[in-house]
Amino acid sequence: MRYRLFGRTGLRVAEMFLGAMALQEPDEARRVVKAYADAGGNVIDTASAYAESESVLGEVLTDRDRFVLATKYTLTRDPHDPNAGGSHRKNLVASLERSLRRLRTDYVDILWVHTWDPHTPVAETLRALDDLVRAGKVRYLGVSDTPAWVVSRADVLAEWRGWTPFAGVQVPYSLLNRDIERDVLPMAEQLGLTVAAWGVLEHGALTGSSRVGSPSPEQQRVAAAVRAVADELGVTPAQVAIAWSRARSSVVHPLIGFRTADRVAETVAALDVTLPPEAVAKLEAAAPFEPGPFADFVNRSAASAGGVRPRRGGGASAAGVRQLGDGGDGPVHRLRRLLGRQAEDPRQEVRGLGVRVDQPPLVEVDTGVGFVAVAQPGVQAHQTELDTDDLEAAHAGAHRAARVPIAFPLPEPAAPLVHEVTIRGQDGSGRPPAC
Ligand SMILES: NC(=O)c1ccc[n+]([C@@H]2O[C@H](COP(=O)([O-])OP(=O)(O)OC[C@H]3O[C@@H](n4cnc5c(N)ncnc54)[C@H](OP(=O)(O)O)[C@@H]3O)[C@@H](O)[C@H]2O)c1
């Protein structure tokens, strides 16, 4: 298991989160948590609304501080009481106090707003959440199942008023449900938010689980494509579905639930599966998704507003770099200019993974010291060595996401390294190359 930073914070979170919704019985829960922890996992997700899950975790988590323990509030605890649900201050305090008692702890690491409450002003929610962070009862904040425009507004409010911002969003995302690609995912990438993706396996529909009952024709078609790719690659359907959820963006962390411990190791092994572009194409052909004419139009307009002349044809170029004022020389020079120059200390150089061509473009850096940093706005850039051939090969290879070797001289061996590079598809649309 590798670790990434949780949003724009320093919290190290595992690449896969453990969903505890189905953990309702201590003995099996203990086995599931142990299997996940043995694989290196450290994030456990529960909620006030998951029946006995919080109480079971409270009984099972003996070394609680080792985990990033997350719970949620908002969904009603009593349908007869109008204030036992909602994102307002009264329910927040009451719900969190109950969660802390059930979890047998005096703080949670991440408190998620479970769902959008359009009746509570977002400023009330943020201010009340910030009080709980300052009181030491909550470490970090996240928001689940909420429109992108609400999250964006909350981000600005928090920043301007000095409140604790949301560091992550929790949303459904699977081959059968790609809605977040329209707004939520681009927003998360732009604002530096972690995406905890639930429903990645469609509750078993993508893995052929008999518990799904009678799957719809669409579920059957996509499950068949998942199975075919799994057979070709010699992996399991669950591993294919999870690998797909991570292929588009490095901010996505699959949040997977288990009833028993049997499948934990196999599921975590999905993190080592990288789908070749043909496999991604085959899967997406079975589950067609269109961003819609408005999103297409907005992306094209944004590209031309940035000064990039749309070009037609295959392949891709570092057009976005030119957009940032480069004189038009080779990609290495452009990237160097973009990333700026820092004093080099060869002793502190870390060689790792490289550039990810994505939407919006992100650079993912394996610091080699235990965790992966992804792009965040406003973080100082460092000089980068990047081989021209590799960069061009990544583009020409029609990969939606590519990794190329890269070397980073670090001021601090353990400092999270973050670079933001704009590399766009050749058509200037902002879409990844050949996607
Ligand atoms: N924020 C929200 O609104 C929200 C909503 C729903 C869930 N969640 C969170 O997301 C977590 C996951 O829930 P989910 O609904 O999204 O479920 P899911 O991950 O889509 O599916 C979970 C099911 O997948 C099966 N599975 C897991 N690994 C497998 C493997 N290797 N091979 C075959 N099947 C496998 C398991 O089935 P078996 O039980 O048969 O083993 C498990 O019950 C929850 O625990 C919760 O923390 C959040």
Image (cartoon, grey):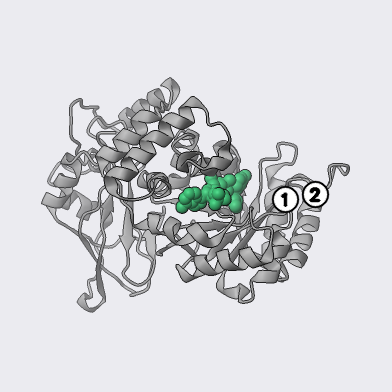
Mark 1 secondary-structure assignment:
loop
Viewer-closest of 254 and 209: 209
Q: Quadrant of the C terminus?
A: top left
To which residue does mark 2 refer?
77
Mark 2 CB lies closer than 8 A to ligand 1: no
Q: Quadrant of residue 430?
A: top left
**Pointer 1: what residue?**
49
The quarter of the picture where the N terminus appears is bottom left
Residue placed most toward the observer, 294 or 20: 20
Give how far across and how far down residue 285 sits, in percent.
Answer: 34, 29
Secondary structure of the residue carrying numbered label 2: loop
Relative horizontal placement of residue 125, taking residue 384 as reference (left or right): right
Q: In the rendering, at what x and y percent does residue 108 appear?
A: 65, 65
Residue 174 visible in rendering: yes
Residue drawn at (42%, 58%), measured in percent from left and top?
A: 266
Q: Position of residue 355 (x, y in %)?
A: 26, 53
**One can see residue 253 in this view:** no
Check contact, mark 1 vs mark 2: CB within 8 A. yes
